[in-house]
Image (tube, rainbow, N blue to C red):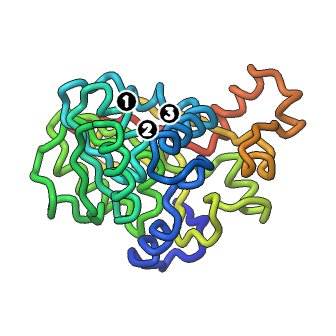
Amino acid sequence: MKNLGLNETSSLEDVQIYWNARPCNLRHSKQQIGTKDYFREVSERRYFVESHIGEFANFSGYKDKRVLEVGCGIGTDGAEFAKNGAIYYGCDLSDVSVNLAKKRFDTFGLLGHFSVVDAEDLLSKYGEQSFDMVYSFGVIHHSPSPKAIVKQISKILRTNGEFKFMVYAKNSWKSAMIEAGLDQPEAQSGCPIAFSFDEQDVRDLLGDDFKIEKISQKHIFRWNIFEYKNYNYVMEPWFREMPDAVYRALEEKFGWHLLVTARKY
């Protein structure tokens, strides 16, 4: 496990301040924040650039199941679970994010239950064996203690329950660019903590509480960042000339997103 953020000794308060200042994906739309058009554009941009999310999350697979999203952000993935019939709960350390998630659900008439919670202390809010599935996409690696979060998830997840999560991949194109000083972990600078993992790190993280069912890598960002910030999708020339099969092979070896599906013993 390697920290690509500013400081491995950053506190939980530092993390909260960072994400409250600019929730993840906040600028995925030019529309007025909180409107239907804004939330629609945020979703469209997310699933266009990170098209692997839908297949990994399997939004339609949890109808009538109790799903907790740890690190719900502004509710983009949560809305998909709710639209497909999940009994959805979302929590986040960022109260700014949670308020926007609630606004999204209210705007679209979706049912969800939201809380501002430290993921290292989930039992303070949820009972033991409360959920059929826990989902966390790009969140655990920002905690000072990822292992503490996983221990909490193990307690609130039912026996044989599913744990699906994404953490950043240590052996990835993006990690190499960050280490070379050519990139940063998040769109906004100053991320205090961003751990990266390899497969052994994931096994150590999960310990004896979980059995890994699938682990894979996806997502190499292909777009010119200047154009992307202006809501234009222009591939960098080296990716534009690359056959799709070659890009997919690179993703499997050097993708930034390490996708893990595990089951609680």
**Residue 160 position within the rendered picture, expressed as x and y whole percent measured from the top left:** 19, 32
Element assignment for label 2: strand
Report, in whole angstroms, how far the alpha carbon at label 1 lies from the one at label 2. Answer: 8 Å
In front: mark 3 or mark 2? 3
In front: mark 1 or mark 3? 3
Q: Is residue 244 above or below residue 92?
A: above
Query: Residue 162 occupies which quadrant of the picture?
Result: top left
Residue of label 2 = 260
Residue of label 3 = 53
In front: mark 1 or mark 2? 2
First-in-chain label (1 vs 3): 3
Pick the front one: 65 or 231: 231
Quadrant location of the C terminus in the rendered image? top left
First-in-chain label (1 vs 2): 1
First-in-chain label (3 vs 2): 3
Report, in whole angstroms, how far the alpha carbon at label 1 lies from the one at label 3. Answer: 17 Å
Dot 1 surroundings within 10 Å: few (below 14), some, or many (20 or more)?
Answer: few
**Residue 133 position within the rendered picture, expressed as x and y whole percent measured from the top left:** 25, 37
Name which residue lies at 47% across and 25% down.
Answer: 55
Element assignment for label 1: strand
Pick the front one: 75 or 155: 75
Element assignment for label 3: helix
Residue 181 appears left or right of 47: right
